[in-house]
Image: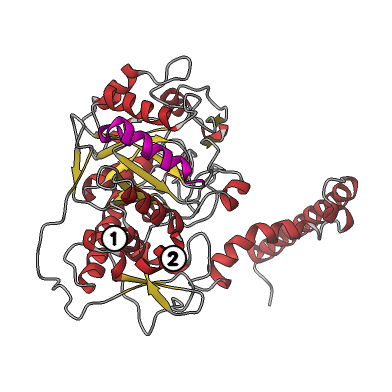
Amino acid sequence: MQLQPWILWGIDLFSGLFLILFWVILISVVYMYIADKLQTKQAIRHNYPVIGRFRYLFEKQGEFFRQYFFSHDREELPFNRAERSWVYRAAKNVDRTIAFGSTQPLDKQGSILFLNSAFPISDHVQQPPIAVTVGEFCPSPYTTDKICHISAMSFGALSRPAVTALSHGAAQAGCWLNTGEGGLSPHHLKGNCDLVFQIGTAKYGVRNQQGQLDNDKLAQIAAHPQVKMFELKLSQGAKPGKGGILPGLKVTEEIAHIRGIPIGEDSISPNGHPEITCVADILDMVAQIRHATGKPTGIKAVIGDISWIEEMCDEILRRGIEHAPDFFTLDSSDGGTGAAPQALMDNVGLPLRESLPRLVDLLIQKGLRQRIKIIATGKLVMPSYVAWALATGADFIASARGNMFALGCIQSLQCNKDTCPTGITTHNKRLQQGLDPKDKSTRVASYNHYLHYDLAMIAHSCGVHDPRLLTRKHAHIVISSGVSISLDQHYRHMAT
């Protein structure tokens, strides 16, 4: 049987393509062999030409395979699969239940166990949530009954569609959105949500030519009705003692204009405010911002050495409680960021589980606990973590990465490279196309709704009608012996 001409033509074509591919591969292998032997920067490639290149490929792909194939549900860092899965399901408004049994090791040291009451509050009992007012001494105090809010993420670290989605999502959820230290952008304002304007060490958006605070620019920012509070950032959990870092490849023309910096150059903030050298200077700057804006003004810091907070409390008591910061945003050493030196991210500052009870107890001791509201932040992405923070003494929590997961973040760890595959932390237009602000804003709102919903469920199980009524007596913490003791007892022992 004679083959059809078109079949013979196809065989010839594929044979030709195979030969071309063979020679391309052969030439490429020869080229890589010669290049590897001639270079001396990488010993593996020089000693094992061509084959040694696979080492770097496998190292790069290791993050992917560990995330999806080899790590158990509770193993990954900084957030494990079980945590991310709950956020994804809450954001998508799908079933959040699990089956068969918990994969959480309940005898692991540090685990929190809430004490259920014999008389839980019925979920059908409707009571208005407890509202908290911040800045009662200000001309424009701020009152909200929401507990969970969106933590600081600047436009620049985040993309335009991501900030837009967060703004609309915060408005739908009724929570605030912290602008981060990169200034106030039009995208923060698009959703008409409540905003907290953060002032970092570079003072982007409110600085004069000398890099100092400009009262007129502060007043212009405060004139926006959406801006409810101002936050003076002293330090950040992921990089205490280091200012903000925005790589030059992410400094677009728009971002450069908002921040007042050159296009395409690294945006490196000072590691501290040059004007602040003592606690009196902190209170002076807080007073300056509050006077210029008329709105509640607080500070943000990660705690290492706590003696400066004692000194600040004493200085407040000398001046009068009206001179105190209206709130203290306490960051954790395991907080997140777009870019930070590993030496600081891994080894500097105290985690929230240690610093939060210390701060709360100190403010109680100084008689300032009611005056200074506490906002806890740092890995508080789950209802149980929020419940712990409230029981320990926080008034509010703020989460950045939880809301990034709601936007679609897959923890690819590429925030500093402008290559984020989900379009959240990149200014690459092609990568941003997959992030629809309308769809993602709904997910942000849904995540925050179920964060509050499940938080209330924990509170009802413990016998209180509002999560703000949780105390240290409502929870136990597992200690080294594998058994648990009350948070109250544990923190008293820690203080001694």
How far apart marks 1 and 2 lie (CA) works out to: 31 Å
Q: Which of the pair 265/129 is nearer the observer? A: 129
Which residue is tagged 2? 493
Residue at horizontal 22 percent and vertical 77 percent from the top: 117
How far across and how far down the image is residue 208, in percent?
Answer: 42, 16
In the structure shown, which secondary structural element does the residue marked by tag 1 occupy? helix
How far across and how far down the image is residue 187, in percent?
Answer: 33, 35
Asked if the magenta segment contains residue 7, the reply would be: no
Question: Which corner quadrant of the image does residue 39 belong to?
Answer: top right
Q: Residues within 10 Å of mark 2 (few under 14, many from 20)?
A: few
Instruction: Say which quadrant the N terminus sits in.
Output: bottom right
Q: Nearer the viewer, mark 1 or mark 2?
A: 2
Query: Which contiguous range is marked in magenta?
Result: 305-324
Q: Which mark is residue 17?
A: none
Asked if the magenta segment contains residue 316, the reply would be: yes
In the rendered image, is residue 197 in sight? no
Which residue is tagged 1? 451
Left or right: 102 with respect to 210? left
In the rendered image, is residue 194 in sight? yes
Residue at horizontal 80 percent and vertical 52 percent from the top: 28
